[in-house]
Image: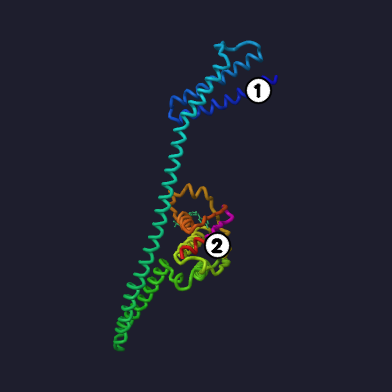
Amino acid sequence: MEMILIMGTSGLLQVIAAFLFWKLIRITGHRLPWVFIAASLCVFALWNGTQIYAVIFKKALLSWPNLPDEILELISSILILSGAVYATPLFMSIKRSREELKGSEEKLRSLTSQLLTAQEQERKRIAMELHDELGQALLVLKLQFSAIGDKLRKDQKSLAEGVQHSLAYLDCLLDNVRRLSWDLCPAVLEQAGLSQALRQLLNEFGGHHKFVQCSIDIDDIDDLIATGSQIGLYRVLQECLTNIGKHAHATKVAVAVKRQESGVSFRVEDNGSGFNMSQVLADKTASGGMGLAAMDERVRMLGGAMGITSEVGKGTRVSFSIPLSRAKSEA
Ligand SMILES: Nc1ncnc2c1ncn2[C@@H]1O[C@H](COP(=O)(O)OP(=O)(O)OP(=O)(O)O)[C@@H](O)[C@H]1O
Ligand SMILES: [Mg+2]
């Protein structure tokens, strides 16, 4: 009985191995050595099956050549060796592919980070041009219009009205230029520092979304974060809030920025619609949304790792930490 059990178990294992090897034939491109190994395993399984049959029913099912155990051992050793010989280049090519993939990923990351840095520099340049060139030109134009207005006689009422309209229009244009320049490169970062800029960002968000209850808990972290890193962090938080405004339909938003021994932790939570992360990642190419990917890359550039947890109907939480050593070393 014990012998039947052992033979049965080994037969079953051989059938499973033969099945798995057989399934791999197509993946290996019908390579002959693999076909040979798989076929041999099938023969072994069949052999074992007929042996069990013979032990149970005391008669042979098939008349196999009566091979001694030593020959069988030799055949299985050859099979194992040929499997190992064949598998070696296979695993080497897997290793090579992995290394190539890693190299491509690193290149892509470095390209993305260069792209984000260049984008930021370009934004700053355009913001300055807008502020210094266009803004100043509009200001000069406004002064000239005012001077013309002052010189008009009292009976030139329609002209005076035209000047007033133009002045109002110029004020509007100046506001737009200032807003555009601010959006491109928030000057508050340089003037008041990151903590203040983040508080202002949240206050503005609260101002634009009157029905959202905002809870803000931001420590002073300016001495911990290098100047060069501040714009990246500002952009990440900005994208979090833009996403909440655009997608979440939340009624509560909580932002916490905390000083910690090892660095600075950031957390942005909302109680909105939430989303299915794997679905969004799968839809990535079709939807073309780049916000989450850019956030992830910016955090990675600062030495952190972003974590997003989101559940449909329950809200979203974005959290990450920036290590202190990294933040200071860039100062
Ligand atoms: N706080 C959130 N609440 C609900 N859904 C969100 C939230 N943040 C992101 N999403 C979902 O994740 C998707 C991807 O966001 P992502 O910021 O990458 O792209 P986008 O906002 O659609 O476009 P882009 O940021 O490029 O303008 C969004 O389309 C949205 O479905
Ligand atoms: Mg977005």
At label 2, which amino acid type do we have? Gly
Is disc 2 surrounded by few (<14), some (14 to 19) or many (20+) residues within 10 Å? Answer: some
- Which of marks 1 and 2 precedes in the sequence? 1
Residue at 45% across, 56% down: 294
Position of residue 187 relative to residue 147, above or below, is above
Question: Does the magenta portion include 145?
Answer: no
**Picture coordinates of residue 227, whole percent (x, y):** 46, 67
Is disc 1 surrounded by few (<14), some (14 to 19) or many (20+) residues within 10 Å? Answer: few
Element under disc 2: strand
Residue at 38% across, 63% down: 121
**Picture coordinates of residue 41, whole percent (x, y):** 53, 23
Element under disc 1: helix
* Colour scheme of the rendered structure: rainbow
At label 1, which amino acid type do we have? Ile
**Picture coordinates of residue 86, whole percent (x, y):** 46, 29
Q: Which residues are magenta?
A: 312-324
The answer to whether marks 2 and 1 mark residues whose Cβ atoms lie closer than 8 Å is: no
Q: Nearer the viewer, residue 331 or 160?
A: 331
Q: 151 left or right of 81?
A: left
Asked whether residue 207 is in view, the answer is no
**Picture coordinates of residue 221, whole percent (x, y):** 53, 68
Mark 2, residue position: 263
Which SS type dominates the magenta stretch? strand
Which numbered tag is attached to residue 6?
1
Q: Nearer the viewer, residue 290 or 107?
A: 107
